[in-house]
Amino acid sequence: MTRTLRFAPIAAAVVLAAAAHAATPGQVAPDFAVNDAAGKPVRLSDFRGKHVVLEWTNPECPFVRKHYDSANMQSLQKEFGAKEVVWLAVNSTNRDHGEFKTGPQMAAWMQQHDAVPRAVLIDETSSTGRAYAARTTPHMFVIDPAGRIVYAGAIDDKRSANPADARTAKNYVRAALTETLAGKPVTTASTTPYGCSVKY
Amino acid sequence: MLRVLTVHRRSAGAVVAACAFAACALAGAAAAAPVRTANVEAELVAERTALVPGQTNTVALRLKIRDRWHTYWRNPGDSGLPTTLDWKLPPGVAAGPIQWPAPKALPAGPLVNYGYEGEVFHLVDLAVPADLPAGTTATLAARADWLVCEDTCIPEGADLALALPVAPTAAPDPSWGAKIAATRDALPRPLAGWGATATGEGDKVQLALTPPPGAGDPGTLRFFPFREAAIEPSGRQVLVRDGGRYVLTLPVAHQLQRFDRVAGVITASAGIGGAKAATLDVPLAGSVVAGPRPLDAPAPRLDLSAGAAASTSTLSLAAALALAFAGGLLLNLMPCVFPVLSLKVMSFVEHRDGKATMHREALAYSSGVVLSFVLLALALVALRAAGEQLGWGFQLQSPAVVAALAVLFFLLALNLSGVFEFGMLAPQSVAGWTSKNRTLDAFGSGVLAVIVASPCTAPFMGAALGYAIAQALPVTLAVFVALGLGMALPYVLLAWFPGWRRRLPRPGAWMERVKQFLAFPLYATVAWLAWVLGAQLDNDAVLRLAVALVLVAFAAWAWRAFRSGGAASWAVAAVAGVAGMAVLVAPLFAPPPATAEARAARATDDGWRDFSPALVEELKAAGRPVFVDFTAAWCVTCQVNKRLVLQDADVLGAFARRNVALVRADWTRRDPQITQALAALGRNGVPVYVLHRPGQAPLVLPEVLQAAMIHEALAGL
């Protein structure tokens, strides 16, 4: 009689393994479809297989200007753009808000600052901002090729609006990208973002 | 002073005149001109007219903020920056930290910041050495930086200075002395008289405040954490009076950084410990997990208002453990577990073992049960952490697992029917049947019992598992361990008190018959699993499974022939049977098609509409009562309730008379929307029955449904 159940552990292991096959470590980045400055829809899933940076931005925000006036943001965009990282600047300012910028306005502002994100996304309903719980401009997310968020938080550790600080600060985004591009786990995966509130 | 300030705004000349007239001249030597930025008037002010050596002297950064604009507290909340002061002081003079007044919660769209509006004094204590020579003038200088925001944010700052005479005595400053003293009186101080504890429970922190005897009602409470990334600034804080205590539920931050103390300011509209605000710093008991994304799109979602949520979220750990234990006990009677347990019990009868062997087996069996539950819980927690929207029963949402279980049950049943014996696979071990093997075997049966039990997750367990899954890991595991202990208990009792064996006939032919009979509940389970598979996929899947089972039976039969001395071709036939089975079942392991398609394919002409949060909102908005049936094909209790109650003509008639909209949320396959709706009700499994009543809190009905309960609930409409 006892022989009946002898193979139970093996069968159990098989069933358990089947139940767990869907496991993926890390938080999954919510997919989105948002129009770029030219009105063309951009999906996060378009970039599956690549590293993606999401940069919440708003030209009216002094903290954003700190990183553009010091050329800090542009140099990050260039440095990692050259390494096949897809950089998406997202403006979640609601279209009803006084600081809202149209696609052409955002494109002109980026051009004027010599900025080179892959695309500027006009999240005029703020829905993508809400999906990511983006709180501040800037608020930075780094997503790995598997679509998992590997870094979320501030751009650096100097919580000020002073452009001079951008040069001396420890840049969390550069550190996270460097590690994840090298296939290493990100040491500092989460920090508290600082800046203006996203204008929902 | 307000009038003076108005003048300041008009012209610089007037500022000087007003200052000279109103304050500066009267104060004697205290001299500092306020600095006007675009949105703030800033200055350093002193509590007294002179610095007194050997004493603590208080000065303040005074910010007079433009109407509707604000500056920030030490923790700015969702965005912003705290105001900073960088002192340049005479040698020997040391400045303390800013003593922050209690902040206000300042909403910015869906975000919440912590800060100040109007006029605010940032007090700083200066330690002035005894040897600072009297009769001289000390210049206190500071760089002040602040972020000032309305909708737009402007970083501002000023280099400020205050020249004060050094004197052995000093009088209160006529302009600022009283305001600084009042600010100091209102500073939040450690909460006096009240008891405070903080307990982490999943994505919430319960801050319990116990008043001293005779304390009045504190009114509305709000907690402002000192730390960022601990409590979600925009999350709702819910105050509940629980007996003599006040329990403030704080939502844990989505982007959480671990914390082990809950420290911050608590404000009370009617006062707490004799003040409007107090500080708290208590250790965090339990532990927390990151909260949900706070700003998810304002899509219609299920109302998680008081009635529904309160009935489950107030479940205490002790109650959850007790419920889980009882649920585990009950699992033994479920049709899927009963045969497995019976076989184990019969092995006692057959072997007439000594006490030690029985005890060892019982412990091994219990370990198998508990360990499997812990593993399942860990798998569930890990998958949820990975972002999967899953709940209890998730194992059965995968067609592959259902098919694998069907094959497993079928093999067990064939074995009981005597078609073949597993021992034939490894004949050499039959002779050396050691006690070690039997211990392992008992452990394996424990594992098997848990696997086959999962479809039968009993009533009582819904609330306990819903509670468990929302908690920190140790609590989750404790609940699942209690479930396992409950399930293992009957077997342990039978092993420890073997007197019952005397009442049974001696082992003999009857045992073979009982064994063969027990195959039938297993065959029935296979039939049911085939039906579940049909509900998940389609008719073709059922046929695939059925043919696969025929091949399994063939392979078992052929193997038996080979082992009993048949030619090698029998073994080849057996292997071919298994291979054929694998080929047939393999497609079921492919990722299933999207839920929406599967749902669209399902008929909806029976008066029940398919669940979506939007549909429920729409029906509620139309003023109709809505009954939601959260169910799954693999959930036995759900099917029983459906057949006995929800398809009952009387019940359907009562629903129709009250114009109740019927909505069915079918969780047979994974569905994040349904998982979220369940979570909103404090549940993590099915069945759940909810009646949304216009103008009332939603009513959650018991898992074991009776027609009378529905009639009673409808009577309350």
Image (cartoon, grey):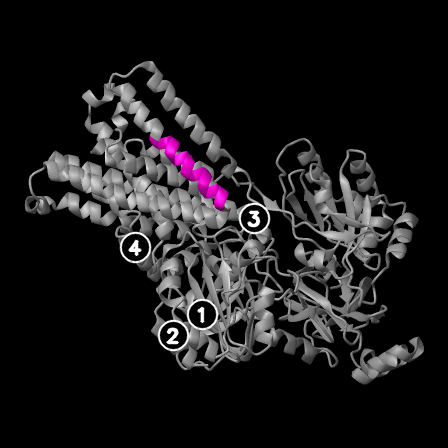
> Which residue is the site of mark 4?
B325
Q: CA distance from mark 3 to mark 2?
A: 42 Å
Instruction: Please state the horizontal and vertical placement of residue B149, each as a whole percent of the image.
Output: 77, 67
Q: Is residue B305 above or below residue A61?
A: below
Check if mark 4's residue and mark 2's residue have beta carbons within 8 Å. Answer: no
Direction from residue B316 to residue B624 in the image, left or right: right
Instruction: Please state the horizontal and vertical placement of residue B139, each as a whole percent of the image.
Output: 78, 64
Residue stretch rendered in magenta on the structure: B539-553
Q: CA distance from mark 3 to mark 4?
A: 29 Å
Callouts 4 and 1 on one subunit? yes
Instruction: Please state the horizontal and vertical placement of residue B102, each as a whole percent of the image.
Output: 62, 71
For the point 72% across and 73% down, the residue is: B117
> Which residue is the site of mark 3?
B387
In this view, the residue farthest toward the bottom is: B3
| Secondary structure category for the residue under label 3 | loop
For the point 38% across and 18% down, the residue is: B572
Please, what is the three-letter code of the amino acid marked with disc 3?
A: Gly
Q: CA distance from mark 1 to mark 3?
A: 26 Å
Callouts 1 and 3 on one subunit? yes
In the rendered structure, which disc, 4 or 1, sits on the residue that comes first in sequence? 1
Please, what is the three-letter code of the amino acid marked with disc 4?
A: Phe
Magenta run includes residue B552 = yes
Q: Residues within 10 Å of mark 1 (few under 14, many from 20)?
A: few
| Secondary structure category for the residue under label 2 | helix
In the rendered structure, which disc, 3 or 4, sits on the residue that comes first in sequence? 4
Q: Residues within 10 Å of mark 4 (few under 14, many from 20)?
A: many
Callouts 1 and 2 on one subunit? yes
Which chain's residue wears label 3? Answer: B
Report the disc number at residue B712: none
Direction from residue A63 to residue B53 in the image, left or right: left
For the point 65% across and 70% down, the residue is: B105
> Which residue is the site of mark 1?
B310
